[in-house]
Image (cartoon, helix red, strand yellow):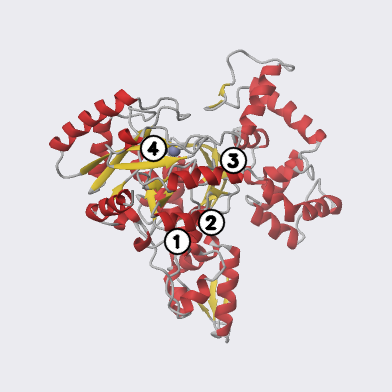
Amino acid sequence: MRGDTAEAELWARAIELVRAQQIESDADAGPLFDNPPSDSDPEVLKRLRQMYEAGGWVLVESAIADLPADLRWLFESGAVTIEQLGAIHRALGVTSSADLADAVRERKLSALVGLNSDVEAAIAAALPTLRARIPRIPLGRAVSVAEMVLEPLRAVPGVVWALPVGSLRRAQDTVGDIEILAPTDQPAAAIEALLSLPTSSHVLHRSERRLYVLTDRVQIGVRLPDPANAGADLLYQTGSTAHFDALCAYAATKGWTLKSDGLHASDGTHTPAPTEDDIYSALGLPFIPPEIRNGDEEVARASRGELPVLVARSDIRGDLHMHSTWSDGRNAIDAMVGACRALGYEYMAITDHSPHSAASRNLTLDGVKKQAEDIARLREQFPDIAILHGCEVDIMPDGRLDFADKVLEQLDIVLASLHDRAGHGPDQLMKRYAAAMTHPLVTLITHPSNRIVPSRPGYDLEYDRLFAMAVETGTVVEIDGAPSHLDLDGALARRAIGAGATVAIDSDCHRAELLGRQMDLGIATARRGWVEARHVLNTRSLADVRSVIAAKRGSR
Ligand SMILES: [Zn+2]
Ligand SMILES: [Zn+2]
Protein backbone atom coordinates (compact mmCIF):
# COMPACT_ATOMS: atom_id res chain seq x y z
CA MET A 1 0.00 0.00 0.00
CA ARG A 2 1.24 3.43 -0.84
CA GLY A 3 1.35 5.76 2.14
CA ASP A 4 -1.39 8.41 2.23
CA THR A 5 1.08 11.27 2.32
CA ALA A 6 3.05 9.89 -0.56
CA GLU A 7 -0.12 9.44 -2.57
CA ALA A 8 -1.32 12.97 -1.88
CA GLU A 9 2.08 14.28 -2.88
CA LEU A 10 1.99 12.29 -6.07
CA TRP A 11 -1.48 13.37 -7.11
CA ALA A 12 -0.54 17.00 -6.50
CA ARG A 13 2.52 16.66 -8.70
CA ALA A 14 0.56 14.77 -11.31
CA ILE A 15 -2.05 17.48 -11.59
CA GLU A 16 0.69 20.06 -11.90
CA LEU A 17 2.24 18.12 -14.77
CA VAL A 18 -1.06 17.46 -16.46
CA ARG A 19 -1.71 21.18 -16.44
CA ALA A 20 1.76 21.85 -17.82
CA GLN A 21 0.97 19.23 -20.45
CA GLN A 22 3.99 17.15 -19.58
CA ILE A 23 1.95 14.01 -19.38
CA GLU A 24 0.65 13.36 -22.82
CA SER A 25 -1.96 10.70 -23.08
CA ASP A 26 -2.57 7.10 -22.46
CA ALA A 27 -3.79 4.80 -25.20
CA ASP A 28 -6.03 2.88 -22.83
CA ALA A 29 -7.29 5.70 -20.66
CA GLY A 30 -7.97 8.16 -23.49
CA PRO A 31 -6.52 11.61 -23.90
CA LEU A 32 -5.91 13.49 -20.69
CA PHE A 33 -6.37 16.97 -22.08
CA ASP A 34 -9.81 17.21 -23.54
CA ASN A 35 -10.12 20.31 -21.40
CA PRO A 36 -7.50 22.07 -19.33
CA PRO A 37 -7.90 20.43 -15.92
CA SER A 38 -8.29 22.31 -12.68
CA ASP A 39 -6.71 21.46 -9.33
CA SER A 40 -9.77 19.70 -8.11
CA ASP A 41 -10.85 18.13 -11.38
CA PRO A 42 -12.20 14.72 -10.39
CA GLU A 43 -11.91 13.59 -14.02
CA VAL A 44 -8.15 14.02 -13.98
CA LEU A 45 -7.82 12.03 -10.80
CA LYS A 46 -10.04 9.36 -12.27
CA ARG A 47 -8.00 9.19 -15.44
CA LEU A 48 -4.72 9.05 -13.55
CA ARG A 49 -6.08 6.22 -11.47
CA GLN A 50 -7.22 4.43 -14.63
CA MET A 51 -3.72 4.84 -16.01
CA TYR A 52 -2.31 3.35 -12.85
CA GLU A 53 -4.64 0.40 -13.10
CA ALA A 54 -3.96 -0.05 -16.82
CA GLY A 55 -0.23 -0.17 -16.15
CA GLY A 56 0.35 3.31 -17.50
CA TRP A 57 1.71 4.27 -14.12
CA VAL A 58 5.21 4.02 -15.47
CA LEU A 59 4.71 7.13 -17.53
CA VAL A 60 2.85 9.07 -14.88
CA GLU A 61 5.44 8.52 -12.27
CA SER A 62 8.51 8.74 -14.46
CA ALA A 63 7.27 12.03 -15.80
CA ILE A 64 6.64 13.28 -12.31
CA ALA A 65 9.94 12.39 -10.81
CA ASP A 66 11.94 12.20 -14.04
CA LEU A 67 13.31 8.98 -12.68
CA PRO A 68 13.68 5.46 -14.01
CA ALA A 69 10.37 3.69 -13.58
CA ASP A 70 12.21 0.90 -11.87
CA LEU A 71 12.61 3.10 -8.82
CA ARG A 72 8.93 3.91 -8.49
CA TRP A 73 8.20 1.15 -6.09
CA LEU A 74 10.57 2.67 -3.58
CA PHE A 75 8.57 5.86 -3.70
CA GLU A 76 5.35 3.90 -3.41
CA SER A 77 6.61 2.31 -0.22
CA GLY A 78 6.67 5.73 1.41
CA ALA A 79 10.32 5.16 2.42
CA VAL A 80 11.57 8.19 0.48
CA THR A 81 10.35 11.41 -1.05
CA ILE A 82 10.60 12.18 -4.73
CA GLU A 83 13.44 14.60 -3.98
CA GLN A 84 15.41 11.98 -2.08
CA LEU A 85 14.88 9.49 -4.86
CA GLY A 86 16.07 12.09 -7.37
CA ALA A 87 19.24 12.60 -5.35
CA ILE A 88 19.90 8.86 -5.29
CA HIS A 89 19.39 8.60 -9.02
CA ARG A 90 21.44 11.62 -10.01
CA ALA A 91 24.32 11.24 -7.57
CA LEU A 92 24.75 7.48 -7.77
CA GLY A 93 23.42 6.74 -11.24
CA VAL A 94 21.00 4.23 -9.73
CA THR A 95 18.67 3.06 -12.49
CA SER A 96 17.44 -0.29 -11.27
CA SER A 97 16.57 -2.11 -8.10
CA ALA A 98 19.78 -4.11 -8.42
CA ASP A 99 21.80 -0.88 -8.44
CA LEU A 100 19.90 0.27 -5.40
CA ALA A 101 20.62 -2.93 -3.54
CA ASP A 102 24.34 -2.44 -4.32
CA ALA A 103 24.20 1.15 -3.06
CA VAL A 104 22.57 0.00 0.17
CA ARG A 105 25.13 -2.76 0.63
CA GLU A 106 27.99 -0.33 0.09
CA ARG A 107 26.32 2.19 2.45
CA LYS A 108 26.51 4.96 -0.14
CA LEU A 109 23.08 6.42 0.55
CA SER A 110 23.52 8.09 3.91
CA ALA A 111 26.43 10.12 2.53
CA LEU A 112 24.10 11.92 0.10
CA VAL A 113 22.77 15.40 0.76
CA GLY A 114 19.22 15.25 2.06
CA LEU A 115 19.51 11.66 3.17
CA ASN A 116 20.47 10.29 6.53
CA SER A 117 20.95 6.92 8.11
CA ASP A 118 17.23 6.72 8.97
CA VAL A 119 16.28 6.96 5.30
CA GLU A 120 18.97 4.46 4.40
CA ALA A 121 17.62 2.08 7.02
CA ALA A 122 14.06 2.56 5.71
CA ILE A 123 15.22 1.76 2.17
CA ALA A 124 17.18 -1.27 3.35
CA ALA A 125 14.12 -2.51 5.25
CA ALA A 126 11.85 -1.94 2.25
CA LEU A 127 14.13 -3.64 -0.30
CA PRO A 128 13.41 -7.34 0.25
CA THR A 129 9.63 -7.11 -0.12
CA LEU A 130 9.21 -4.17 -2.45
CA ARG A 131 10.18 -5.89 -5.66
CA ALA A 132 6.91 -7.81 -5.60
CA ARG A 133 4.93 -4.56 -5.75
CA ILE A 134 5.93 -3.69 -9.30
CA PRO A 135 3.12 -4.32 -11.75
CA ARG A 136 4.65 -6.81 -14.12
CA ILE A 137 4.39 -6.51 -17.90
CA PRO A 138 2.58 -9.33 -19.74
CA LEU A 139 5.05 -11.30 -21.90
CA GLY A 140 3.27 -10.49 -25.18
CA ARG A 141 3.46 -6.77 -24.57
CA ALA A 142 7.07 -7.01 -23.36
CA VAL A 143 8.07 -8.89 -26.52
CA SER A 144 6.46 -6.34 -28.82
CA VAL A 145 7.95 -3.36 -26.96
CA ALA A 146 11.41 -4.96 -26.84
CA GLU A 147 11.27 -5.61 -30.59
CA MET A 148 11.01 -1.87 -31.18
CA VAL A 149 14.53 -1.56 -29.75
CA LEU A 150 16.05 -4.94 -30.63
CA GLU A 151 15.50 -4.74 -34.38
CA PRO A 152 17.13 -1.31 -34.87
CA LEU A 153 19.94 -2.18 -32.44
CA ARG A 154 20.89 -5.24 -34.46
CA ALA A 155 21.35 -3.02 -37.49
CA VAL A 156 23.85 -0.69 -35.79
CA PRO A 157 27.43 -1.22 -37.01
CA GLY A 158 29.54 -2.70 -34.20
CA VAL A 159 26.68 -4.37 -32.36
CA VAL A 160 27.64 -8.06 -32.21
CA TRP A 161 24.18 -9.25 -31.16
CA ALA A 162 21.22 -7.91 -29.21
CA LEU A 163 19.16 -10.05 -26.87
CA PRO A 164 16.71 -9.45 -24.06
CA VAL A 165 17.83 -10.71 -20.65
CA GLY A 166 16.04 -11.57 -17.41
CA SER A 167 12.50 -12.86 -17.27
CA LEU A 168 11.84 -11.72 -20.84
CA ARG A 169 14.54 -13.99 -22.26
CA ARG A 170 13.30 -16.79 -20.04
CA ALA A 171 9.81 -16.16 -21.49
CA GLN A 172 8.06 -15.88 -18.15
CA ASP A 173 4.34 -15.06 -18.42
CA THR A 174 4.98 -11.63 -17.02
CA VAL A 175 8.16 -9.61 -17.13
CA GLY A 176 9.63 -7.40 -14.44
CA ASP A 177 12.17 -5.26 -16.28
CA ILE A 178 12.72 -5.07 -20.00
CA GLU A 179 16.50 -5.16 -20.21
CA ILE A 180 18.49 -5.65 -23.38
CA LEU A 181 22.10 -6.57 -23.81
CA ALA A 182 23.93 -5.53 -26.97
CA PRO A 183 27.71 -5.97 -26.89
CA THR A 184 29.63 -3.48 -29.01
CA ASP A 185 32.99 -1.77 -29.30
CA GLN A 186 31.20 1.43 -30.31
CA PRO A 187 28.62 2.15 -27.59
CA ALA A 188 28.26 5.79 -28.65
CA ALA A 189 26.97 4.75 -32.09
CA ALA A 190 24.43 2.43 -30.52
CA ILE A 191 23.22 5.13 -28.12
CA GLU A 192 22.90 7.64 -30.96
CA ALA A 193 20.89 5.14 -32.98
CA LEU A 194 18.58 4.46 -30.05
CA LEU A 195 18.06 8.14 -29.32
CA SER A 196 17.09 8.78 -32.92
CA LEU A 197 14.27 6.23 -32.79
CA PRO A 198 10.85 7.87 -32.95
CA THR A 199 9.72 5.45 -30.23
CA SER A 200 12.32 6.60 -27.68
CA SER A 201 10.07 9.18 -26.12
CA HIS A 202 11.85 9.98 -22.91
CA VAL A 203 15.45 9.38 -21.79
CA LEU A 204 15.65 8.34 -18.15
CA HIS A 205 19.35 7.70 -17.88
CA ARG A 206 22.32 7.83 -20.14
CA SER A 207 25.93 6.90 -19.53
CA GLU A 208 28.75 5.51 -21.65
CA ARG A 209 27.44 1.96 -21.91
CA ARG A 210 23.89 2.26 -20.61
CA LEU A 211 20.69 3.88 -21.80
CA TYR A 212 17.24 3.84 -20.21
CA VAL A 213 14.38 5.09 -22.35
CA LEU A 214 10.62 5.04 -22.23
CA THR A 215 9.28 3.22 -25.27
CA ASP A 216 5.52 2.97 -25.70
CA ARG A 217 5.09 3.89 -22.02
CA VAL A 218 7.41 1.14 -20.81
CA GLN A 219 10.94 1.53 -19.52
CA ILE A 220 13.60 -0.28 -21.54
CA GLY A 221 17.13 -0.58 -20.26
CA VAL A 222 19.90 -1.18 -22.78
CA ARG A 223 23.37 -2.23 -21.71
CA LEU A 224 26.22 -2.14 -24.20
CA PRO A 225 29.02 -4.21 -22.72
CA ASP A 226 32.46 -5.02 -24.10
CA PRO A 227 32.03 -7.98 -26.50
CA ALA A 228 35.04 -9.77 -25.00
CA ASN A 229 33.11 -10.83 -21.88
CA ALA A 230 29.51 -10.33 -23.01
CA GLY A 231 28.67 -14.04 -22.62
CA ALA A 232 29.28 -13.75 -18.89
CA ASP A 233 27.03 -10.67 -18.73
CA LEU A 234 24.34 -12.45 -20.70
CA LEU A 235 24.44 -15.52 -18.46
CA TYR A 236 24.32 -13.49 -15.25
CA GLN A 237 21.62 -11.08 -16.36
CA THR A 238 19.42 -13.77 -17.87
CA GLY A 239 19.23 -15.58 -14.53
CA SER A 240 17.24 -16.93 -12.95
CA THR A 241 19.02 -16.34 -9.66
CA ALA A 242 18.36 -19.98 -8.76
CA HIS A 243 19.86 -21.17 -12.06
CA PHE A 244 22.94 -19.00 -11.59
CA ASP A 245 23.34 -20.27 -8.02
CA ALA A 246 23.05 -23.87 -9.21
CA LEU A 247 25.71 -23.17 -11.86
CA CYS A 248 27.99 -21.57 -9.24
CA ALA A 249 27.66 -24.68 -7.08
CA TYR A 250 28.37 -26.92 -10.07
CA ALA A 251 31.36 -24.78 -11.09
CA ALA A 252 32.80 -25.17 -7.59
CA THR A 253 32.76 -28.97 -7.98
CA LYS A 254 34.87 -28.50 -11.13
CA GLY A 255 37.41 -26.24 -9.44
CA TRP A 256 36.08 -22.97 -10.85
CA THR A 257 34.56 -19.94 -9.16
CA LEU A 258 31.65 -18.51 -11.15
CA LYS A 259 30.86 -14.85 -10.50
CA SER A 260 28.78 -12.24 -12.25
CA ASP A 261 31.75 -11.49 -14.52
CA GLY A 262 32.36 -15.12 -15.44
CA LEU A 263 34.71 -17.95 -14.52
CA HIS A 264 37.75 -17.58 -12.28
CA ALA A 265 40.33 -20.33 -11.97
CA SER A 266 41.69 -21.41 -8.57
CA ASP A 267 44.80 -19.28 -9.13
CA GLY A 268 42.54 -16.23 -9.56
CA THR A 269 42.85 -15.85 -13.34
CA HIS A 270 39.68 -14.73 -15.05
CA THR A 271 38.60 -16.31 -18.34
CA PRO A 272 36.68 -13.85 -20.53
CA ALA A 273 33.61 -15.37 -22.20
CA PRO A 274 32.31 -13.77 -25.42
CA THR A 275 29.39 -16.23 -25.44
CA GLU A 276 27.40 -18.13 -22.82
CA ASP A 277 28.47 -21.32 -24.50
CA ASP A 278 32.09 -20.59 -23.51
CA ILE A 279 31.02 -20.83 -19.86
CA TYR A 280 28.77 -23.87 -20.18
CA SER A 281 31.38 -25.75 -22.19
CA ALA A 282 34.23 -24.82 -19.81
CA LEU A 283 32.07 -26.49 -17.14
CA GLY A 284 31.55 -29.53 -19.37
CA LEU A 285 27.85 -28.74 -19.81
CA PRO A 286 25.72 -28.40 -22.94
CA PHE A 287 24.04 -25.05 -23.55
CA ILE A 288 20.98 -24.80 -21.31
CA PRO A 289 18.02 -23.05 -23.03
CA PRO A 290 17.00 -19.85 -21.19
CA GLU A 291 13.35 -20.97 -20.92
CA ILE A 292 14.28 -23.78 -18.49
CA ARG A 293 16.81 -21.87 -16.39
CA ASN A 294 14.66 -22.12 -13.29
CA GLY A 295 17.19 -23.68 -10.95
CA ASP A 296 15.17 -26.81 -10.36
CA GLU A 297 16.90 -29.74 -12.04
CA GLU A 298 18.24 -28.39 -15.34
CA VAL A 299 21.90 -28.19 -14.26
CA ALA A 300 21.86 -31.72 -12.83
CA ARG A 301 20.09 -33.03 -15.94
CA ALA A 302 22.56 -31.19 -18.20
CA SER A 303 25.50 -32.72 -16.32
CA ARG A 304 24.05 -36.19 -16.98
CA GLY A 305 23.45 -35.43 -20.66
CA GLU A 306 19.68 -35.65 -20.13
CA LEU A 307 18.46 -32.26 -21.29
CA PRO A 308 15.34 -32.33 -23.48
CA VAL A 309 15.58 -31.12 -27.06
CA LEU A 310 12.94 -28.41 -26.72
CA VAL A 311 10.38 -27.85 -29.44
CA ALA A 312 11.35 -25.07 -31.87
CA ARG A 313 9.62 -23.01 -34.53
CA SER A 314 11.14 -25.17 -37.26
CA ASP A 315 9.28 -28.21 -35.84
CA ILE A 316 5.85 -26.60 -36.25
CA ARG A 317 3.99 -27.77 -39.37
CA GLY A 318 0.62 -26.09 -38.90
CA ASP A 319 -1.64 -24.02 -36.68
CA LEU A 320 -4.89 -25.59 -35.47
CA HIS A 321 -6.61 -22.66 -33.75
CA MET A 322 -7.42 -19.26 -35.25
CA HIS A 323 -10.41 -16.98 -35.81
CA SER A 324 -11.75 -15.10 -38.82
CA THR A 325 -14.45 -12.55 -39.49
CA TRP A 326 -16.94 -15.45 -39.24
CA SER A 327 -16.61 -14.82 -35.50
CA ASP A 328 -14.52 -12.24 -33.64
CA GLY A 329 -11.42 -12.32 -35.84
CA ARG A 330 -10.18 -9.16 -37.56
CA ASN A 331 -9.46 -10.73 -40.97
CA ALA A 332 -11.34 -12.80 -43.52
CA ILE A 333 -10.23 -16.40 -44.03
CA ASP A 334 -8.37 -15.37 -47.23
CA ALA A 335 -5.96 -13.23 -45.22
CA MET A 336 -5.46 -15.93 -42.60
CA VAL A 337 -4.65 -18.43 -45.36
CA GLY A 338 -2.21 -15.99 -46.95
CA ALA A 339 -0.41 -15.45 -43.65
CA CYS A 340 -0.23 -19.19 -42.87
CA ARG A 341 1.22 -19.87 -46.32
CA ALA A 342 3.80 -17.14 -45.75
CA LEU A 343 4.74 -18.88 -42.49
CA GLY A 344 5.36 -22.06 -44.47
CA TYR A 345 2.67 -24.13 -42.76
CA GLU A 346 1.50 -27.38 -44.34
CA TYR A 347 -1.92 -27.09 -42.72
CA MET A 348 -4.11 -24.74 -40.74
CA ALA A 349 -7.54 -24.84 -39.11
CA ILE A 350 -10.13 -22.08 -39.09
CA THR A 351 -11.87 -22.44 -35.73
CA ASP A 352 -14.45 -19.71 -35.12
CA HIS A 353 -16.57 -19.35 -32.00
CA SER A 354 -19.89 -21.16 -31.54
CA PRO A 355 -23.28 -19.35 -31.15
CA HIS A 356 -23.30 -18.98 -27.35
CA SER A 357 -19.67 -18.03 -26.88
CA ALA A 358 -19.00 -14.82 -24.98
CA ALA A 359 -17.00 -13.52 -27.98
CA SER A 360 -18.09 -10.24 -29.52
CA ARG A 361 -19.24 -12.07 -32.70
CA ASN A 362 -20.04 -15.73 -33.18
CA LEU A 363 -20.55 -18.26 -35.91
CA THR A 364 -24.18 -19.12 -36.66
CA LEU A 365 -25.54 -22.38 -38.01
CA ASP A 366 -26.03 -20.71 -41.37
CA GLY A 367 -22.53 -19.25 -41.08
CA VAL A 368 -21.02 -22.75 -40.83
CA LYS A 369 -22.46 -23.63 -44.25
CA LYS A 370 -21.33 -20.43 -45.91
CA GLN A 371 -17.93 -20.71 -44.27
CA ALA A 372 -17.60 -24.20 -45.75
CA GLU A 373 -18.15 -22.71 -49.23
CA ASP A 374 -15.56 -20.04 -48.53
CA ILE A 375 -13.05 -22.68 -47.48
CA ALA A 376 -13.82 -24.91 -50.48
CA ARG A 377 -13.05 -21.99 -52.78
CA LEU A 378 -9.75 -21.26 -50.98
CA ARG A 379 -8.75 -24.93 -51.08
CA GLU A 380 -8.99 -24.83 -54.86
CA GLN A 381 -7.10 -21.60 -55.03
CA PHE A 382 -4.29 -22.68 -52.66
CA PRO A 383 -3.64 -26.40 -52.98
CA ASP A 384 -0.24 -25.96 -51.27
CA ILE A 385 -1.82 -25.68 -47.82
CA ALA A 386 -4.48 -27.90 -46.24
CA ILE A 387 -7.27 -25.75 -44.79
CA LEU A 388 -9.18 -27.58 -42.09
CA HIS A 389 -12.69 -26.40 -41.39
CA GLY A 390 -13.01 -26.40 -37.61
CA CYS A 391 -14.74 -24.71 -34.74
CA GLU A 392 -13.93 -23.66 -31.18
CA VAL A 393 -17.15 -24.84 -29.64
CA ASP A 394 -18.21 -23.74 -26.16
CA ILE A 395 -18.77 -26.34 -23.48
CA MET A 396 -22.14 -25.27 -22.11
CA PRO A 397 -22.89 -25.14 -18.35
CA ASP A 398 -24.59 -28.56 -18.57
CA GLY A 399 -21.57 -30.09 -20.32
CA ARG A 400 -23.18 -30.26 -23.76
CA LEU A 401 -21.49 -28.70 -26.77
CA ASP A 402 -22.77 -25.49 -28.34
CA PHE A 403 -23.40 -27.12 -31.77
CA ALA A 404 -25.36 -30.30 -32.42
CA ASP A 405 -23.33 -33.39 -33.30
CA LYS A 406 -24.74 -33.36 -36.83
CA VAL A 407 -23.10 -29.95 -37.33
CA LEU A 408 -19.83 -30.85 -35.64
CA GLU A 409 -19.38 -34.10 -37.55
CA GLN A 410 -19.29 -32.12 -40.82
CA LEU A 411 -16.17 -30.32 -39.55
CA ASP A 412 -12.59 -31.50 -39.94
CA ILE A 413 -11.61 -30.66 -36.36
CA VAL A 414 -13.49 -29.64 -33.21
CA LEU A 415 -11.86 -27.67 -30.42
CA ALA A 416 -13.82 -27.33 -27.16
CA SER A 417 -13.53 -24.54 -24.66
CA LEU A 418 -14.87 -23.43 -21.29
CA HIS A 419 -15.08 -19.73 -22.03
CA ASP A 420 -17.83 -19.24 -19.49
CA ARG A 421 -17.28 -20.43 -15.95
CA ALA A 422 -21.04 -20.00 -15.26
CA GLY A 423 -20.31 -19.54 -11.57
CA HIS A 424 -19.11 -23.13 -11.31
CA GLY A 425 -16.62 -24.44 -8.76
CA PRO A 426 -13.82 -26.89 -9.56
CA ASP A 427 -15.98 -30.03 -9.38
CA GLN A 428 -18.57 -28.78 -11.83
CA LEU A 429 -15.86 -27.43 -14.16
CA MET A 430 -14.20 -30.84 -14.14
CA LYS A 431 -17.53 -32.47 -14.98
CA ARG A 432 -17.93 -30.18 -17.96
CA TYR A 433 -14.40 -30.96 -19.11
CA ALA A 434 -15.06 -34.67 -18.64
CA ALA A 435 -18.21 -34.42 -20.75
CA ALA A 436 -16.31 -32.64 -23.54
CA MET A 437 -13.30 -34.95 -23.41
CA THR A 438 -15.40 -38.10 -23.60
CA HIS A 439 -17.21 -36.65 -26.62
CA PRO A 440 -15.77 -38.47 -29.66
CA LEU A 441 -15.93 -35.37 -31.87
CA VAL A 442 -13.76 -33.23 -29.56
CA THR A 443 -10.09 -33.43 -30.50
CA LEU A 444 -8.65 -30.62 -28.45
CA ILE A 445 -9.35 -28.61 -25.28
CA THR A 446 -8.32 -24.99 -25.77
CA HIS A 447 -6.64 -22.83 -23.06
CA PRO A 448 -7.56 -25.36 -20.33
CA SER A 449 -6.97 -23.18 -17.23
CA ASN A 450 -8.85 -20.25 -18.79
CA ARG A 451 -6.65 -17.70 -17.08
CA ILE A 452 -6.18 -14.13 -18.29
CA VAL A 453 -2.62 -12.81 -18.16
CA PRO A 454 -1.97 -10.85 -16.00
CA SER A 455 -5.28 -10.27 -14.25
CA ARG A 456 -7.10 -13.58 -13.72
CA PRO A 457 -5.55 -16.77 -12.36
CA GLY A 458 -6.52 -20.09 -13.93
CA TYR A 459 -9.13 -22.49 -12.58
CA ASP A 460 -8.15 -24.25 -9.42
CA LEU A 461 -8.57 -27.76 -10.85
CA GLU A 462 -7.02 -31.13 -10.17
CA TYR A 463 -4.92 -30.85 -13.30
CA ASP A 464 -3.32 -34.26 -12.91
CA ARG A 465 -6.81 -35.75 -13.13
CA LEU A 466 -7.57 -33.59 -16.16
CA PHE A 467 -4.37 -34.71 -17.90
CA ALA A 468 -5.04 -38.37 -17.03
CA MET A 469 -8.48 -37.97 -18.58
CA ALA A 470 -6.90 -36.42 -21.70
CA VAL A 471 -4.67 -39.49 -22.05
CA GLU A 472 -7.56 -41.89 -21.42
CA THR A 473 -9.88 -40.26 -23.94
CA GLY A 474 -7.23 -39.45 -26.55
CA THR A 475 -7.93 -35.73 -26.23
CA VAL A 476 -5.21 -33.18 -26.93
CA VAL A 477 -4.66 -30.25 -24.51
CA GLU A 478 -3.60 -26.89 -25.82
CA ILE A 479 -0.75 -24.50 -25.17
CA ASP A 480 -2.41 -21.33 -26.42
CA GLY A 481 -0.04 -18.59 -27.58
CA ALA A 482 -2.45 -15.66 -27.38
CA PRO A 483 -0.72 -13.17 -25.05
CA SER A 484 -3.69 -13.04 -22.70
CA HIS A 485 -3.81 -16.86 -22.44
CA LEU A 486 -0.35 -18.51 -22.57
CA ASP A 487 -2.36 -21.46 -21.36
CA LEU A 488 -1.35 -24.15 -20.41
CA ASP A 489 1.51 -22.28 -18.77
CA GLY A 490 4.99 -23.81 -18.60
CA ALA A 491 4.48 -25.56 -15.28
CA LEU A 492 1.14 -27.10 -16.29
CA ALA A 493 2.45 -28.05 -19.73
CA ARG A 494 5.27 -29.93 -18.03
CA ARG A 495 2.76 -31.83 -15.89
CA ALA A 496 0.64 -32.56 -18.96
CA ILE A 497 3.46 -34.16 -20.93
CA GLY A 498 4.65 -35.86 -17.74
CA ALA A 499 1.23 -37.52 -17.58
CA GLY A 500 1.64 -38.66 -21.17
CA ALA A 501 -0.79 -36.18 -22.74
CA THR A 502 -0.33 -34.83 -26.24
CA VAL A 503 -0.29 -31.02 -26.50
CA ALA A 504 -1.00 -28.71 -29.42
CA ILE A 505 0.75 -25.34 -29.70
CA ASP A 506 -1.65 -22.88 -31.29
CA SER A 507 -1.73 -19.17 -32.01
CA ASP A 508 -5.46 -18.67 -31.22
CA CYS A 509 -4.89 -15.68 -33.45
CA HIS A 510 -7.53 -13.10 -34.32
CA ARG A 511 -5.35 -11.06 -36.72
CA ALA A 512 -3.40 -12.37 -39.69
CA GLU A 513 -0.36 -10.21 -38.98
CA LEU A 514 0.04 -11.73 -35.49
CA LEU A 515 -0.12 -15.41 -36.47
CA GLY A 516 3.64 -15.83 -36.30
CA ARG A 517 4.18 -13.84 -33.12
CA GLN A 518 1.47 -15.69 -31.21
CA MET A 519 2.80 -19.05 -32.38
CA ASP A 520 6.22 -17.96 -31.07
CA LEU A 521 4.70 -17.07 -27.69
CA GLY A 522 3.05 -20.50 -27.59
CA ILE A 523 6.36 -22.18 -28.44
CA ALA A 524 8.21 -20.18 -25.77
CA THR A 525 5.58 -21.22 -23.21
CA ALA A 526 5.88 -24.85 -24.30
CA ARG A 527 9.66 -24.65 -23.98
CA ARG A 528 9.24 -23.42 -20.40
CA GLY A 529 7.35 -26.68 -19.88
CA TRP A 530 10.24 -28.82 -21.22
CA VAL A 531 8.03 -29.75 -24.19
CA GLU A 532 9.73 -31.56 -27.06
CA ALA A 533 8.54 -31.90 -30.65
CA ARG A 534 7.43 -35.49 -30.01
CA HIS A 535 4.85 -34.26 -27.46
CA VAL A 536 3.21 -31.85 -29.90
CA LEU A 537 0.36 -32.69 -32.27
CA ASN A 538 1.10 -29.96 -34.80
CA THR A 539 4.71 -31.01 -35.32
CA ARG A 540 3.28 -34.09 -37.03
CA SER A 541 2.20 -34.57 -40.62
CA LEU A 542 -1.35 -33.75 -41.67
CA ALA A 543 -2.00 -37.48 -42.11
CA ASP A 544 -0.98 -38.08 -38.49
CA VAL A 545 -3.14 -35.19 -37.26
CA ARG A 546 -6.09 -36.60 -39.19
CA SER A 547 -5.53 -40.04 -37.73
CA VAL A 548 -5.55 -38.63 -34.16
CA ILE A 549 -8.91 -37.00 -34.98
CA ALA A 550 -10.22 -40.13 -36.68
CA ALA A 551 -9.08 -42.45 -33.88
CA LYS A 552 -11.23 -40.61 -31.37
CA ARG A 553 -14.18 -40.29 -33.72
CA GLY A 554 -13.90 -44.01 -34.45
CA SER A 555 -14.38 -44.73 -30.76
CA ARG A 556 -18.06 -43.84 -31.05
ZN1 LIG B 1 -11.02 -19.47 -26.72
ZN1 LIG C 1 -9.91 -19.09 -29.81
Q: Position of residue 297 (x, y in %)?
A: 54, 71
From the image, tell me which residue sits under label 1.
497
Judged by depth in the image, the label closer to the viewer, 1 or 3, is 1
Mark 2 crowdedness (10 Å alpha carbons): few <14, some 14-19, many ≥20: some
Between 234 and 349, the residue placed more toward the observer is: 349
The first of marks 3 and 2 along the sequence is 3
How far across and down, in percent of the image, does residue 250 sit? Answer: 56, 79
Residue annotated with mark 3: 456
Q: Position of residue 395 (x, y in %)?
A: 46, 37
Report the quarter where the N terminus lies. Answer: top right
Left or right of 394, for residue 297 = right
Give the tally of numbered discs: 4
Instruction: Name the residue type under label 1.
Output: Ile
Amino acid carrying mark 2 in the image: Arg
Query: Do the residues under discs 3 and 2 have CB atoms within 8 angstroms?
Result: no
- In three-dimensional space, the C-alpha distance between marks 1 and 3, rounded to whole angstroms, equals 24 Å
- What's the CA distance linking mark 4 and mark 2? 23 Å
Q: Residue at x 54, y 47 (%)?
A: 430
Disc nearest the viewer among 4 and 3? 4
Residue 265 coordinates in the image, percent (x, y): 54, 83
The kind of residue tagged 4 is Glu
> Where is mark 2, residue-wise?
465
Element marked by disc 3: loop
